[in-house]
Image: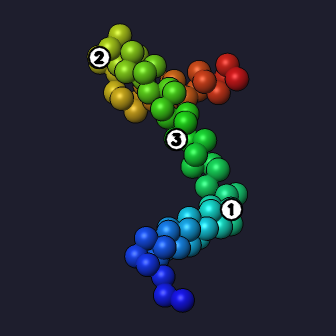
Amino acid sequence: MPLNPSSKRLTLWMGVTILVVVLLWVLGPVLVPFAVAAVLAYALHPLVLKLQKLSPWMPRLLCVVLVEVMALCSG
């Protein structure tokens, strides 16, 4: 029985979805630290900007390090 184009498309997307889910499941332990780092960077970025605005003479790298140290010490 031949498949019509919409059935072929559905089958293709189901296969791609299953492949992505299996790939994420297998690589999960490796990807978790990257996901945590992305969330922390997103959450702490406003503090870095505020610190930069309060002290414009301070380099951005130093602001990032100070915010990271404060976040680690408070947790």
Residue 60: which disc? none
Q: Is residue 27 visible?
A: no
Mark closer to the chain start, 2 or 3: 3
- At a point 48% along the width and 32% down the height, the residue shown is 42
Identify the mark nearer the N-term, 1 or 3.
1
Q: In the image, is residue 42 above or below residue 56?
A: below
Do the numbered discs 1 and 3 sit on residues whose CB atoms are within 8 Å? no
Q: Nearer the viewer, residue 21 or 29?
A: 21
Tell me where residue 62 appears, x and y as whole percent.
42, 28
Q: Which mark is residue 25?
A: 1
Tag 3: amino acid: Ala
> Mark 2 sits on what residue?
56
Labels 1 & 2 near each other (Cβ < 8 A): no
Residue furthest toward the top? Answer: 54
Q: CA distance from mark 1 to mark 3?
A: 19 Å
Q: Foreground: 11 or 64?
A: 11
Badge 1 or badge 2: first in the primary sequence: 1
Q: Position of residue 5 (x, y in %)?
A: 40, 76
Residue 1 appears anywhere in the view: yes
In this rendering, would 3 be left or right of 28? left
Residue depth check, mark 1 versus mark 3: number of the one nearer the observer: 1
Residue 41 point in image, percent of width and height:
49, 34
Report the residue marked by disc 3.
Answer: 38
Q: In which quadrant of the rendered image does the N terminus lie?
A: bottom right
